Amino acid sequence: MNFDEMVREILERTKLDHDELMARIKQKQDELAGFVTPEGAAIIVGRELGVELVKKELEVRQLRIEDLCPGMSNVDIVGRVVRVYEPRSFQRVDGSQGRVASLLLEDSTGRVRLVLWNEDVEPIERGEVQKGMALQVKGAFVRKGLDQQPELNLGSRGSLVLNPDDPRVAELPPIKEVKVRVADLSPGMGDVDLVGRVVATTEPRAFERPDGSLGKVSTIVLMDSTGRARVSLWDEKAEVAKSLRRGDMVKLENAYVRLGPKGKPELHLGWRGRLLLNPPGAEAEALPEVEERLLKVEEIEADMPSLDFAAKLRRKFPPHEFKRDDGSLGKVMSATLADETGIIRASFWDGMVELAESLSPGDVLLVRGAYTRPGLAGRPEVHVGATARVEVNPPGLSVGDFEPSKLKVGELEPGMDGLEVVARVIEVSPPREFKRADGSKGLVATLTLGDETGTVRASLWHEQAEHAGRVKVGDVVRLVNCYTTLGLFGQPELQLGRQGALEVNPPIAEQLPPADVLEMVKAEPKRVAIASLQKEGARAEVRGTIVRVFHRRPIFDICPSCGRSLGSVDTSLMCEECGKVVTPEHRPVLSFVLDDGTGNIRAVLFGRVAEKLLGMDAKEVFERFRAARDLEEFYADLKLVGREVILTGVTRHDKYFDQLELRASDVQLPDARREARALLEGIKA
């Protein structure tokens, strides 16, 4: 008899209905921990009801993945490896270290996750377990996984057999491997496997997460026959970049894809991912060799230990001397370089300064053996030191001209350069004279501009300010070769200097909203729960408690004349826009985690907003910072943790560390009357 025949026999000889009988059979299977087939359970239930069903010897078959139920033990099963997840360390209750890894197995009936512990992890660490191979699991037990599905675990009495000599192997379906190429990548893809050659690597860099834990990330660039892709290696994977060399073949497994800061799909390899060096197979052998191509500016990453590139000199700035920690004198000169893909800042050090001084705008530079470091907002800066080699206008080498990047107002962030922005004028402030630190006079005019994505303040400097008289509310303006700085309240501000151009009412393809409509964009935002903040560009008010403060340098420097953020510590007195050494103006900056019970978010407060929360001006913050023994003492004295605040701001996606943060434009302490009125209005509504 088959199972259906058994069910019909019992129903005919008893008074049970179909649903009740099936429930009894299922209950009997559960009582026996899944060790009997449905046919066996039906025989036992029939016997209990006085119905004898055994008419032939029961068929005994070996377990398949679909047969697995939580509670089974001493399981012997064969499957094909579909996914291999890298081992991770964890700390036991007694303080000792343990290791855990997992595999995804498949047979003709389904898939199951296999978890390996401690010594059983070693075959994965040695690279012996490969995707696509057959695997026999002996002595395992089954429990319910985090996804509520059966999960195999290999305990102390279990064992693995790689490529077993077992008849069940012949029944395993071939692995359905989807070959992904660089050209196929799109945001949202997961469990991506890709084979490529290493084009470039960066050093690992550390960062602090909102929960206080430390993380690491490094970057590699991979290429295949269809293109190049940026890959971020996170945490334990970050150190792998140190051992990789240009031209190495690697295979990524279990990567995922997100949209990168340059608008292109990028791969990420986290704890579930795997990187295999020099993988076997025809796919790896078919990879093209890495051509000796110079990097483009847009391909340059921060923390590259060595790079070769070509670019045109865009601007250069006067050199200046500085004193090192050991008392010796050094010399540095800054410049901006560009090709058709972007602009980058470069610093020429010591012996290279003389060469940099001889350069003229438009000169083509072939730079070999330079290195990079993160600069403003984490953007890469090139450093040309003693080990670098520079050729000026080498024969046969040409570099494309840079075209300004066209951005909407809502896409602006502090520290951007070489921009083109088209927007409508909402407000106009006439030119005014100001006195610089050296006593000379300057001219500046301000505009408030807007488009459908937001509003921004724009400052016109020097000769550009004289053009403000022909601009009126409602006009459309195009600012070319402008740059952004950080405003007093943490918002980006546009700056148009000598290198830029202003066009009034140029022909444009898109229709901008009227000025009175754009004025409404500045209306006060509504109070929301932090958990609802999921997208970039949301303007909102949140109320919460400061639960953690990041111990970062609480001061940044700007030029007192033009507002441009100054560079790294070694060149902090050089203003690129003014082209001279200036006495920096200090601005405070705070970064903390705000929690309202529904969720938490990293908040950043700049300038006047930070001063308002601290109840002190920038000078006092700077003096306290200098007087403190260390950052821990400085932040402890501020007594910020535990304070409840109301922040108004805009959400921004920190693309460098892949997190959403709130950049505050105002801060308030909760007022009982105001909060009560808001609650009553909500109840009435």
Image (cartoon, rainbow, N blue to C red):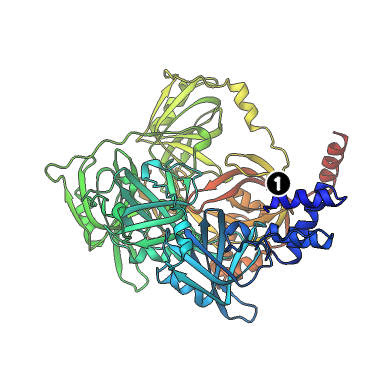
* Residue 628 point in image, percent of width and height: 57, 70
Residue labelled with disc 1: 542
User: Is the residue 371 above or below the residue 365 in the image?
Assistant: below
Foreground of the two, 141 or 32: 32
Answer yes or no: is residue 283 visible: yes
SS at mark 1? strand
Q: Quadrant of residue 55?
A: bottom right
Q: Quadrant of residue 50?
A: bottom right
Q: Is residue 329 left or right of residue 215?
A: left
* Residue 495 point in image, percent of width and height: 45, 37
Q: Is residue 456 left or right of residue 176?
A: right
User: Is the residue 118 above or below the residue 646 in the image?
Assistant: below
Q: Amino acid at mark 1?
A: Val
The residue at the point 65 percent across, 63 percent down is 57
Foreground of the two, 192 or 452: 192
Q: Around disc 1, counting alpha carbons within 10 Å, would you say few (fewer than 14), some (14 to 19), or many (20 or more)?
A: many
The residue at the point 56 percent across, 61 percent down is 113
* Residue 118 point in image, percent of width and height: 53, 76
User: Is the residue 2 above or below the residue 186 in the image?
Assistant: below
User: Is the residue 181 above or below the residue 211 in the image?
Assistant: above
